Amino acid sequence: MVRPKSTIYEVARRSGVSTATVSRVMQSSTGFSAETKQRVLRAAGELGWVPSGTARALAARRVGVVGLIFSDLATDAGVDSESPLFVHHVIRGAERVATLAGEAVLIASTRSSGGRELALRVAGQVDGLVVAAPALSERDIAELARSIPVVVIAARPARRTYDIVCADNRGGSATVTGHLIDEHGYRDVVFVAGPKRSPDSRERFAGFRDALAAAGRDAPDAPAAHGNFTETGGAQAMRDILASHGAPDAVVFGNDEMAIGALAVLRQHKLRTPGDVAVTGFDDIASARHVSPSLTTVRQPMGQLGEEAVRAVFARIADPTGRRGSLTLATDLTIRRSCGCRGARRAQTQKTAESRSS
Amino acid sequence: MVRPKSTIYEVARRSGVSTATVSRVMQSSTGFSAETKQRVLRAAGELGWVPSGTARALAARRVGVVGLIFSDLATDAGVDSESPLFVHHVIRGAERVATLAGEAVLIASTRSSGGRELALRVAGQVDGLVVAAPALSERDIAELARSIPVVVIAARPARRTYDIVCADNRGGSATVTGHLIDEHGYRDVVFVAGPKRSPDSRERFAGFRDALAAAGRDAPDAPAAHGNFTETGGAQAMRDILASHGAPDAVVFGNDEMAIGALAVLRQHKLRTPGDVAVTGFDDIASARHVSPSLTTVRQPMGQLGEEAVRAVFARIADPTGRRGSLTLATDLTIRRSCGCRGARRAQTQKTAESRSS
DNA sequence: TTGTAGGCGTTATCAT
DNA sequence: ATGATAACGCCTACAA
């Protein structure tokens, strides 16, 4: 049975002290006698009193909560969606450093529409906000950043009013593509992108082109196909490529899920991986190790992105002035079997550089 | 640059109306002229005003946030931890129905200690609470339930002061074990449990025993091994069993991750799965499909658990009185290759019953 | 060590 | 349709 909530006044009366003293007992570790503390705590326990976080936040001007906004894809599949696993890890990473700092994380996801108002509601309930693009438009983000510290997880324009943290998508993509070209000597290598408007997908395609250019080859203006970052999308993309282009030497997928989807299609077409068509992914999700052949991919520090984003929020709360910064986390080439390498019992890795600027 | 936050007073002055009117514009859709609305909205925009969620919550006596407490395992590995994937899905499920209802979710995880105070802090900031056992002790949960609606995700005693929702762990485990015994005729089948104190693990072991009893066999009092719900733990458990017991006909793992870890060990020992040793898991995580052989397992509706838990919280907020209820979600036997079945192109499934009581 | 009292920024009730 | 004005539950100088 849920009792009517009691307040600090009742606790104060019951323990024979003032509300100020109750407040002190609840949040300081000093400034009152041991006996007073006992009385207050007992009264609180008897009444089942839980201090109102909202009242406390209002009076203290600090909520102790950081918000995290991302876009949902289960409900809003197709457009602008990020990999569910990506979101999972970001949430947990954020939660981890927040909890360690004694704060909590408020999460909410944007659906097909209404992102702006959702963001405003959340913004009013937190001390700072991390938004995983592409949950919100550049315009909405800029508006939020006027009234509250905002950190965006994504590559963003240099001129902006908020901090960013992101993974080195471009570098990682260039590295894995370079591996395919330089180590394996594949000639015909193509790229399968995720959603067209995904910033991550674009960065990865840019890295793909970088590697081609570095090898002195012509780079296509557009990806060979788009696969929506899903297994079925990747499978469909693979079929399309096979039909219109024939079997390439290698295909660089924008993420692991698409690559995994493609593996099955290749098998159905009696094409051997990596013998006939080599394949790589991006992210290094759990299944990448388990799939057969095991998937060569680029590890992205998804949890760490969430962690660093929250740290950046805290830093910005502590110092609201100063130039906006950006932190780019290194990615990590993880070599397994699908690229054509053999006998790599333990995955070899090659890290891109981490960079920070402000 | 973060401006000093403006308040409803400034917006009211700037737009030449009272704070009451501003408030109405922000939350009603009626009760003011179109022109007034324009003026207010413009003033708000110019000032970059974001209504204070805490002040609003205090005045309205409703926060619009539901809390979710779980136990962390990355930081607090070993004891009482749940599968990370389980938590991921529960979080997303909770978030999904909360967002649809216009609410947000506040998440926090308990570490090795301090669970009680964390829970109290969270409780003060939300309208209701869902706690994924074993994040909190029975005692702490009971205390919380005195002052706020609480829903626990786990099997729990019949006499309690809160609602529960859980998956039919016991039934699912009995079903998969029965499949091994009845369909395949395996004689020597053993069970590998998760953490000793995990309620889910216990339920699954109980289901395992149910199936043995139903087949007229003797059931062991304890699991053959404990694997901590992790891949490495499952691998170690498999090694231990092989060493002390020899190769059984089949082993029922308390979750998928342990089963996947065991697959590799079996391979190292030149034992064929399912030829020599059949294996089953529990949860149906993504890798279960990708691993080789594909894993026969029991699908648990993890996301739905989160969804139903939040719905139950809403229901309890709407009606604080009345008997506490419990909802048991059906689980789903998902047959693939590791149990010895062949040619199941599409996994066959067999659902346990869903039950609800109050 | 303890008490008094004025905010904190909204919402909601009554008027007008 | 709009305006005054009490709450809402706690924190924090400022006093004592």
Image: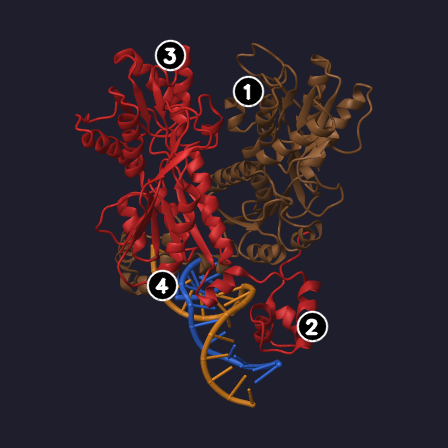
Chain colours: A brown, B red, C orange, D blue
Who comes first in sequence, dot 3 or dot 2?
2
Q: Position of residue A323 (x, y in %)?
A: 71, 43
Q: Amino acid at mark 3?
A: Leu
**Residue A294 circle label:** 1
The relative height of residue A101 versus residue A49 in the rendered view (above or below) is above
Q: Residue furthest front?
A: B343
**Residue B39 circle label:** 2
Report the residue marked by disc 4. A7
Can you tell which of label 3 and label 2 is closer to the viewer?
3
Q: Amino acid at mark 1?
A: Ser
Q: Position of residue B20 (x, y in %)?
A: 57, 75
Q: Position of residue B173 (x, y in %)?
A: 30, 33
For the residue labelled by badge 2, is the local secondary structure a helix, a strand or a loop? helix
Q: Residues within 10 Å of mark 4 (few under 14, many from 20)?
A: some
The relative height of residue A202 versus residue B107 in the rendered view (above or below) is above
Q: Is residue B269 left or right of residue A271?
A: left
Report the residue marked by disc 3. B271
The span from disc 2 to disc 4 (Cα, nearest Å) is: 39 Å
Q: Are marks 3 and 2 in contact (CB under 8 Å)?
A: no
Q: Would you identify the image quadrant in which residue D15 lies?
A: bottom left
Query: Which of the image's four quarters has the C terminus of chain B?
Result: bottom left
Give the residue drawn at x 31%, y 22%.
B251
